[in-house]
């Protein structure tokens, strides 16, 4: 039964992480000027690649925050920082590559790979920088 002693902590962290992940996804799809979910339903590979790269770019530092945090509040704080960083990746890249919006909406795979890849790379760096 010792194995189940940490079950409440697992459930609290897991539920919080799923909540943060859902919140991030909801905020991110509202931030972008194109409708990712609708585009993906229509078969837009560029939108799918961009979104999954961004979600992975958020999940990596969130996982790092879970693994290294000293409390649930600490994990939520670092999860919020990871959320902000991913939002800034999109805003910065959309300024550097102004045709990104039309490219993703128009299913130009290069734009989706660029955004998804950049989000994933920054997420990996973000996760590594979360030193406690």
Image (cartoon, rainbow, N blue to C red):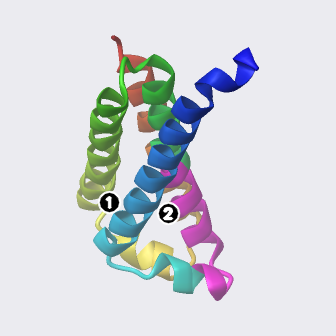
Assess whether residue 47 is covered by the magenta stretch: yes
For the question of whether residue 120 can be seen, the reply is no
Which quarter of the image is occupied by the C terminus?
Answer: top left
Circle 2 is placed at which residue position?
A: 111
Residue for point 42% across, 27% down: 65
User: CA gap, disc 1 to disc 2?
Assistant: 9 Å
Residue 76 occupies which quadrant of the picture? top left
Most distant residue in the top direction: 132
Assess whether residue 68 is covered by the magenta stretch: no
Q: Position of residue 21 (x, y in %)?
A: 47, 53
Q: Quick one: 66 or 107, which is closer to the camera? A: 66
**In the displayed structure image, the side of residue 109 where residue 104 appears, left or right:** left
Q: Position of residue 127 (x, y in %)?
A: 44, 26
Circle 1 is placed at which residue position?
A: 97
Residue 118 occupies which quadrant of the picture? top left
Callout 2 secondary element: helix
Most distant residue in the right direction: 1
Residue for point 58% across, 57% down: 52
Please report the bounds of the magenta region as a residue range. Answer: 40-55
Which quarter of the image is occupied by the N terminus?
Answer: top right
Q: Quick one: 107 or 1, which is closer to the camera? A: 1
Pointers 1 and 2 in contact (C-beta within 8 Å) = yes
Residue for point 69% across, 26% down: 4
Q: Position of residue 122 (x, y in %)?
A: 41, 36
């Amino acid at each position: 039964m010792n194995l189940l002693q940490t079950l409440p902590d697992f459930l609290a962290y897991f539920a919080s992480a799923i909540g943060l992940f859902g919140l991030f996804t909801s905020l991110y799809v509202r931030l972008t000027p194109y409708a990712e979910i609708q585009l993906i339903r229509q078969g837009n590979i560029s939108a799918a690649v961009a979104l999954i790269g961004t979600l992975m770019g958020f999940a990596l530092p969130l996982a790092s925050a879970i693994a290294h945090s000293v409390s649930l509040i600490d994990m939520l704080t670092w999860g919020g920082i990871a959320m902000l960083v991913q939002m800034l990746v999109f805003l910065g890249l959309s300024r550097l590559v102004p045709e990104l919006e039309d490219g993703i909406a128009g299913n130009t795979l290069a734009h989706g790979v660029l955004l998804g890849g950049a989000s994933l790379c920054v997420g990996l760096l973000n996760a590594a920088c979360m030193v406690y």
